[in-house]
């Protein structure tokens, strides 16, 4: 009888253990699901540090939890912690290769880390998963631009605009691809479309400034440069304004703009050349009797040559007008 009792107890023990284990697993699952809800809520409230802590807690118990890995990648991305976001997305993409969020998030993190070839591959995988994703097409386009392959970027930028016509980023990418492939008028149209769909950011103003310059819209160059300079000291904008004023025949305003450029950045040799050219112009108009203009031209050209000695055109100009002495 005693043996029978022991046997019955022995038989009962495994089933009791399984019951306890099942209860533990269910409790853990409930806790992890709660943490997932809390992490999602933290992201919605833009409390990304809290979200990271909650996702880390989930992953400590379930290292292969794909939603938590994607969530962690997203929270780290929002914090700008690309080094932390990338491995989380990479693991999620490995565990679940057909996850668009994992592949796209991985591509974005790689792009932010300047790992453009890898980013391109990840974006391509995302686009295969969802061919109708404008953001994935945009990611491919921007990666090709970063790799200085605008001819490859162009069809993806065009596709991004088709899929997301109200996304200013797609129009900006298209403008950059068109500009780099020599389609200046179309590039300007794309940049203008971008500016209509977003606030006038410094980046879009710079794009417009250079696009206007490339198509010879000098008044628009002046206006855009003035807008940029109203917000910050920008030597490049001042130099472009000087260039545009010169093309408009407004030489005094051109000289003032070039002088502003070198005050902002004394190493801007193109602006020194601009000062030299405007001064040389004054000297020639005076029938070469305005010695002040001549001296200013000589000093400006020599300053430019000291900064950038490899300027054969400037050297030839100095020789032609005997400005070396």
Image: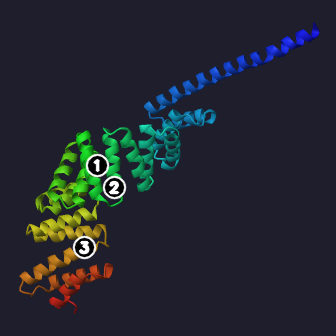
Q: Position of residue 215 (x, y in %)?
A: 13, 61
Q: Position of residue 158 (x, y in %)?
A: 24, 48
Callout 3: SS? helix
The residue nearer to you, when weighing 197 against 294, is 197
Neighbor class of circle 2 (other Cα within 10 Å; few <14, some 14-19, many 20+) is many
Q: Is residue 251 visible?
A: yes
Whether label 1 touches label 3, CB < 8 Å: no
> CA gap, disc 2 to disc 3?
30 Å
Q: Position of residue 137 (x, y in %)?
A: 32, 45
Q: Quadrant location of the C terminus?
A: bottom left
The residue pinned by badge 3 equals 270
- Taking the view exactly as shown, the residue that stands out farthest to the top is 1
Give the label on residue 156, or none: 1
Instruction: Identify whether 20 is placed above or below 35.
Output: above
The residue nearer to you, when weighing 118 against 265, is 118
The residue mark sitting in front, 2 or 3, is 2
User: Is 178 on the left or on the right of 141, as rendered?
Assistant: left
The residue nearer to you, when weighing 268 against 189, is 189
Whether label 1 touches label 2, CB < 8 Å: yes
The residue pinned by badge 2 equals 144
Give the label on residue 2, or none: none
Neighbor class of circle 3 (other Cα within 10 Å; few <14, some 14-19, many 20+) is many
Q: Is residue 164 visible?
A: no
Instruction: Identify whether 156 is placed above or below 302.
Output: above
Which comes before the other along the chain, label 1 or label 2? 2
Quadrant of the image occupied by residue 290: bottom left
Callout 1: SS? helix
The residue mark sitting in front, 1 or 3, is 1
The residue that appears at 29% across and 60% down in the rendered structure is 233
Q: Position of residue 65 (x, y in %)?
A: 55, 34
The residue that appears at 51% across and 26% down in the rendered structure is 37
């Amino acid at each position: 009888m005693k043996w029978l009792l022991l046997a019955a107890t022995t038989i009962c023990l495994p089933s009791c253990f399984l019951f306890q284990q099942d209860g533990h697993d269910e409790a853990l699952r409930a806790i992890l699901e709660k943490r997932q809800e809390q992490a999602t809520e933290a992201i919605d409230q833009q409390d990304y540090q809290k979200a990271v802590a909650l996702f880390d807690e989930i992953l400590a118990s379930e290292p292969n939890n794909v939603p938590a890995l994607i969530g962690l990648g997203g929270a780290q991305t929002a914090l700008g912690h690309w080094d932390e976001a990338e491995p989380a997305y990479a693991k999620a993409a490995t565990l679940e290769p057909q996850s668009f969020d994992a592949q796209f998030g991985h591509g974005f993190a790689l792009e932010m880390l300047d790992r453009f070839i890898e980013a391109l591959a990840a974006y391509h995988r995302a686009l295969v998963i969802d061919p109708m994703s404008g953001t994935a097409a945009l990611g491919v386009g921007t990666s090709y631009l970063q790799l200085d392959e605008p001819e490859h970027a162009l069809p993806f930028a065009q596709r991004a605009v088709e899929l997301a016509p109200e996304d200013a980023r797609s129009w900006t990418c298209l403008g950059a691809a068109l500009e780099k492939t020599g389609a200046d008028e179309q590039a300007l149209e794309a940049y203008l479309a971008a500016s209509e769909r977003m606030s006038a950011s410094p980046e879009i103003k710079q794009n417009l400034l250079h696009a206007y310059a490339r198509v010879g819209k000098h008044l628009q160059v002046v206006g855009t440069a003035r807008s940029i300079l109203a917000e910050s000291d920008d030597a490049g904008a001042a130099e472009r304004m000087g260039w545009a004023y010169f093309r408009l025949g407004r030489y005094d305003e051109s000289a003032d703009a070039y002088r502003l450029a070198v005050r902002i950045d004394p190493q801007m040799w193109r602006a020194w050349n601009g000062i030299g050219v405007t001064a040389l112009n004054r000297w020639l108009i005076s029938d070469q009797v305005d010695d002040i203009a001549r001296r200013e031209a000589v000093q400006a050209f020599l300053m430019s040559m000291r900064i950038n000695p490899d300027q054969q055109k400037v050297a030839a100009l100095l020789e032609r007008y005997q400005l070396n002495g």
